[in-house]
Each structure stands twice: as C-alpha cells, then as structure tokens.
Image (tube, rainbow, N blue to C red):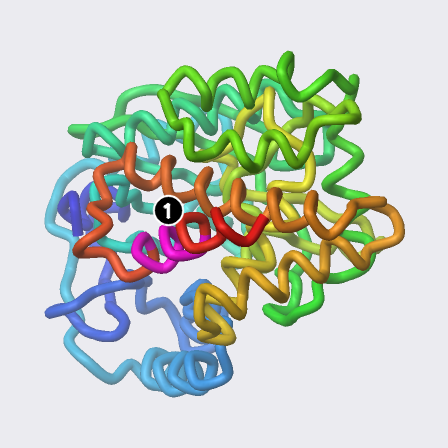
C-alpha cells in the first residue's frame, strides 16, 4: 500500500485485508458479519473465475478469518479531509489500485447504516497525481449526470485527494458486443464536427511526429468528425447502469474534452477482448472493426472502422506510456502496440 492504512481509518478501527496482509488489495473494518459481507463487495472481479475467487474472499471476510490489525494513530486524516463535504461519514473501505506508476487508492465512505456516501481517491506518485488532476478537470466539465459530482480536491497526508459523490447503479456486464445504448451515451458527448486536418485531437497527435499514423488519418478524410468528450478508459467496469436505465461513467482520469469520436467504443471492445476474452491482438482488432462497421448508428466504412480501431489502441498505448508503463515489461502495452503496429498494412 502506498500509504499507511492508518491514514484512511478512524483511530481504533480493527482492520482486515483481502486477500491478506502480504498482498493487500482491499482493507475493510471488522464491524459485524453482515457489514463485512457488504463491505467486501467492493473487491473488483469481472471474469467468471475472478468472481468465484472474490466469493471465497468475501466468505473469509464475513467469518473474520485472517489477521486483524488495529489502527493506532490518534487522528483520522481522511475524516478531517471529508468532514465538511460528508459529515455523516463514519467508516471506510479502502481499495488499492493496480500496481504501477499511476497507482492510486480509492476509499469508499459509508455512514452508520452502511450506506455509501461518496468516494475518495488518493495519489502520491507523480503520474498518479497528474491523472487525478486530469480527472478533476473532467468532472468540472462533463455534463451533469455523465459522471460523479466533484465535492472537494486538496492535499491529504503525503499526497493529493479528490472527493466525489457516488454514481448509483451496477457495472455493465463484461461481455461483447457492448450494450446497445452504450453508443447513445458515448455519442451524446459529441458537439460540433470538423474536418480531420482541423480536429484538435488529430493535431495534438501529429505534433508528436508520428508519421506512421497518417495512413489512418487519410482513411478518415472526406467527412467531418465531431470534437467529443472522450472518457479515455471506457470499459464495462467504468460504466454503471442506474435503476432508471440511464448510464453514468466513473474514473475519468484519462479523459479529454477534445477527443475523437468512437475511440471510446473501440477501446471498450479492445479492452474487453484483451482482459476478459483473452483474444489475440489481431483477432480483437478484427472483431472491433467489424463491430464498428456493422453498427447502423455509426455509418462507418470498413476502412474507417479499422482506422478507428488502430487509433484507439495507439491512444491507449500513448497514455499509459506517459504514465511510465514500459512496453517491454507490460503485457497489455505490448498487446496494444501489436494492434496498432500490425494494422498499418491492413488499412
């Protein structure tokens, strides 16, 4: 854990970890059995085997198996930070993000009855702070209802923290093809169209001296493309369906206000193909391009769909490279690079 768990829990709290203290992913207070069961639902799992594993961990937490440690600090830094915005917060469940340069910690704040009041993200590393500031900008700019509401941003402990409201609902199933109304949500964030050469996202990419991308941009000439709000990490686990059927998205740290249309949809398909279906780069790229080209709402040619698939892989590759993920040591980065490099001759 990047910071001591004492930073997040009230003094005297007895804390369990899942899977264990040697490789902690989720920290939760002991409380009582039903609350431990509910708190442990914050442990992420989307593949079938991962859900079975999570069930075993939740049962372990419910019966309080494993070592319990007590918070010995005399203060509650998270409580002080959140007090003015969420005065009813009395307990917290803490999820440690995926290890890496942009690793963050996410705390779920609850009231006395176990109700979720909000979320706090905490970052210490430079790349993580950069992404947290990016998410702050996005939450201040996206339409109401598209994501959580920003409540507070500032320093906490040795890092920076951001407090937001929860987005109610359940994550979308991690299956393909994507839900039909996902297109409606994605395209609703697209205002005015412009030619490819004038598109701010394209101009920003070209400033990086990437001539190998020109073949894809050429495939997109001939019509105008919207300047869209792009989520940047558009996946089933980052999109929630509310009880009224509407959608909202969380984790906007890779977002931009000047994105290119349909890259989020392509990324959604690619990321799900890689992490859930374990498809090869070529098979995932083929599936994604066929999905985009076959969607009647998008009106894309096969060439345009293939170009957008490649650009989505490159866009994700570049963002994670900026975080410090090296392609030779990160499997997902190698996978993405294969999608956009191997497709140059296929456009």
Q: Residue furthest right?
A: 296
| Position of 151 relative to 345 (above/below) | above
Where residue 155 sits: x, y (%)?
A: 27, 21
Image position of 282 (left or right of 129): right
Give residue 338's quadrant in the image: bottom left
Query: Where does the image place residue 141, in percent across and percent down from the top left?
Result: 62, 19
The residue singled out by tag 1 in the image is 106
Count the labels in the image: 1
Q: Is residue 18 visible?
A: yes
Q: Provide the secondary structure element on which disc 1 rests.
A: strand
**Mark 1 crowd level (few <14, some 14–19, many ≥20, 10 Å Cα):** many
Q: Main SS type for the magenta part?
A: helix
Q: Can you tell which quarter of the image residue 319 is in?
A: top left
**Residue drawn where x is 45% and y is 63% of the image:** 42
- Look at the image and say whether residue 89 sits in the magenta stretch: no
Q: In this view, does 329 lie above or below 69?
A: above
The residue positioned 45% from the left and 20% from the top of the image is 206
Residues 281 and 215: in front is 215
At 54% across and 25% down in the image, what residue appears?
256
Q: Most extreme residue toward the front, as rendered?
A: 345
Residue 25 in percent (x, y) is at 27, 63
Decide if residue 86 is in sight here: no
Q: Which residue is drawn at 32% across and 62% down?
A: 28
Q: Is residue 71 left or right of residue 245?
A: left
* Front one among 342 and 39: 342
What segment is highlighted magenta in the picture?
333-339
118 sits left or right of 227 in the view: left
Residues 280 and 221: in front is 221
**Residue 242 rendering spot, x and y as whole percentages:** 75, 53
């Amino acid at each position: 854990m990047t910071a001591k768990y004492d930073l997040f829990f009230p003094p005297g709290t007895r804390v369990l970890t899942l899977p264990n203290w040697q490789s902690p992913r989720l920290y939760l207070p002991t409380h009582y059995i039903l609350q431990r069961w509910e708190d442990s639902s914050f442990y992420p799992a989307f593949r079938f085997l991962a859900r079975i594993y999570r069930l075993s961990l939740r049962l372990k937490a419910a019966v309080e198996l494993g070592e319990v440690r007590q918070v010995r600090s005399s203060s509650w830094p998270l409580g002080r930070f959140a007090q003015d915005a969420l005065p009813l917060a009395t307990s917290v469940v803490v999820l440690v993000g995926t290890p890496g340069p942009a690793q963050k910690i996410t705390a779920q704040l609850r009231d006395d009855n176990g109700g979720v009041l909000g979320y706090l993200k905490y970052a210490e590393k430079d790349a993580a702070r950069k992404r947290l500031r990016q998410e702050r900008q996005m939450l201040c700019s996206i339409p109401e209802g598209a994501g959580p509401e920003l409540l507070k941003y500032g320093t906490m402990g040795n890092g920076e923290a951001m407090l937001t409201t929860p987005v109610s609902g359940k994550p979308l199933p991690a299956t393909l093809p994507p839900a039909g109304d996902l297109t409606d949500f994605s395209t609703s964030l697209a205002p005015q169209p412009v030619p490819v050469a004038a598109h701010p996202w394209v101009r920003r990419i070209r400033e990086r001296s990437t001539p190998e991308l020109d073949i894809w941009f050429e495939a997109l000439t001939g019509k105008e493309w919207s300047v869209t709000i792009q989520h940047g990490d558009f996946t089933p686990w980052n999109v929630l369906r509310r009880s009224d059927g509407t959608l909202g998205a969380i984790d906007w740290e890779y977002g931009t206000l000047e994105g290119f249309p349909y890259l989020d949809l392509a990324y959604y398909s690619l990321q799900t193909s890689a992490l859930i279906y374990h498809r090869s780069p070529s098979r995932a790229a083929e599936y994604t391009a066929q999905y985009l080209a076959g969607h009647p709402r998008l009106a894309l040619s096969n060439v345009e769909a293939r170009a957008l698939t490649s650009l989505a892989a490159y866009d994700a590759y570049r963002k994670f490279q900026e975080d410090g993920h090296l392609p030779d040591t990160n499997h997902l980065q190698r996978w993405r690079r294969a999608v956009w490099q191997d497709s140059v001759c296929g456009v």
